[in-house]
Amino acid sequence: MQDVRIRICAGAILSCSAFLSLYGAAAALLWWLIFTPRLKLIVRIRSFLGIIFMIAIIAIIVQIMQGSGVSYFGRMTVVILIGMWLAAEYKPGEFLHFGTWLLGKNIGFELGLIAEMAMQSFVTLRVDLDHIRMALHVKGIPVTIKTIIPTGNLLIHRELFRAKDNADLLAVRGYQYGGKLTPVFFSCKRDIVAGLCAMFVMIIALFPFVNFLYFDSEVLRGLL
Amino acid sequence: MEVGIVKVVLDDVMLKRQNFSLAARGEFSEGVHLITGAVGSGKSTLALAIAGNFPTEHGGISRVGFGSMMISMQFPEYHVTRMTLKEECISWGHEPEEFFSSPDLLGREDQSPFVISRGELKRFHLSCVLKKHYDLLLLDEPFSSLDCESKQVFCHHLLHRKEGVTIVFTHEEMFLPHVDRIWEIINGVLYDRGALPGALPRWAGAPPHIKKMIEKGKTPKNISYEDVLEATCRT
């Protein structure tokens, strides 16, 4: 999907829909199967399985405590798939254009810049993790629970240092607040169709609530 | 496995990375090898491939007879796995007491590897690497970020490596180690320039001062700072 505006809106709608109900999750999954490159998105299978594993643990706890763990697992898996699609489709600079288009050259530009920097941080975090993994391998240190905590510490530490460097760089270049930018977007018919279908997914997700409200009002009417 | 013989064999290796490719063949036997080439010529990629951390497009890389191997990457922060210099030192398998008794590291055990300068971190990292013996030692740009004094200390340290295979990948021109063989990457191909001192006239990318010495008929015996100085003073 080329148009970042439609992509972000569709991503938000689909994520909410998937989280709201199992109907929504099923419809969002169908949307994901039709409008995305599907399994090609999962470039890091180990990371994906790691996330799914964490969701599964939480789902088991929810299942034991409330009995809705299976539903939680299904809904969250679809949310993750939507998130992976959004991350894979991202092109550097898009959020800056989107923010400026949505909220203007001051707060919009600022939020866009923050989003861009956050995305850059995700990329560098991944690179940092690869380097640490290789360094551990070179030193002959096995990856265990014992090494995970210092690795996490190190990643946060590096990111904070990098954030400070970025802040210094912006200050040196005279950045204060907001900026001028003419947003440019490219869209095609398929983007519009996908966007409309995402809205339809939301309607499906809300169906159980509408049904519930209708049923509720019937009961209410009967009582009255 | 051949007992007693250590060598790295590049068997018609092809490495590819986006728009870049490198063809390499040759045998790295016991001793110190220098691989030179311009920035972006593929030195780091070749180092990673020899270490087994980069896949070959075709051909194979055999590491024969090595019990231990180490690759020192160009950027010292890539090797950091701990929060303090002391922990970092332990992660390399060294005793911190003897490490932090040197004047430049005295009292710095609890410092973060990220608050010291890159040059200091590089020096610290190289000390950690060179304190241990490895049968195969790959040093990618070991001189980057170092001052002249540290470069010379490093070159002198390599003189003590009598066993195993050491491969130094660098584009440094002034402070070079005493080496046994020179290799060169030009236009995506690795060329073996041969053993010293015969390799010097064949070394296309030789530093200008060495080229000048050869032109004057004062070919140095080797490429270390001391060897070049000796050739300069030769009458």
Image (cartoon, rainbow, N blue to C red):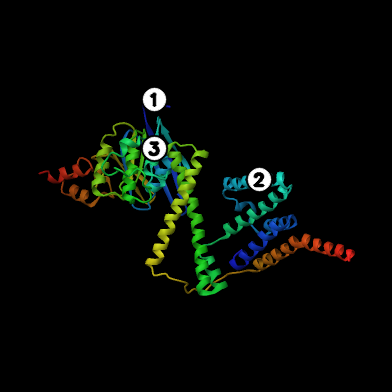
Above/below status of B22 relative to B181: below
Which quarter of the image is occupied by the N terminus of chain B? Answer: top left
Above/below status of A38 relative to B50: below
Q: Amino acid at mark 3?
A: Ile
Whole-number angstrom distance, CA of label 2 to CA of label 1: 51 Å
Disc 3: which residue: B90
Q: Amino acid at mark 2?
A: Ala
Whole-number angstrom distance, CA of label 3 to CA of label 2: 37 Å
Circle 3 chain:
B
In depth, the one of A71 and B20 nearer the eye is A71
Disc 1: which residue: B3
Disc 2: which residue: A56
Q: Image point 66% across, 59% down: which residue?
A: A15
Where's residue A84, x and y in %?
A: 60, 55
Which quarter of the image is occupied by the C terminus of chain B? Answer: top left
Circle 1 chain:
B
In depth, the one of B54 and A77 nearer the eye is A77
Question: Can residue A118 be seen by looking at this rendering?
Answer: yes
- For the residues bearing labels 3 and 2, Cβ distance under 8 angstroms: no
In depth, the one of B184 and A38 nearer the eye is A38
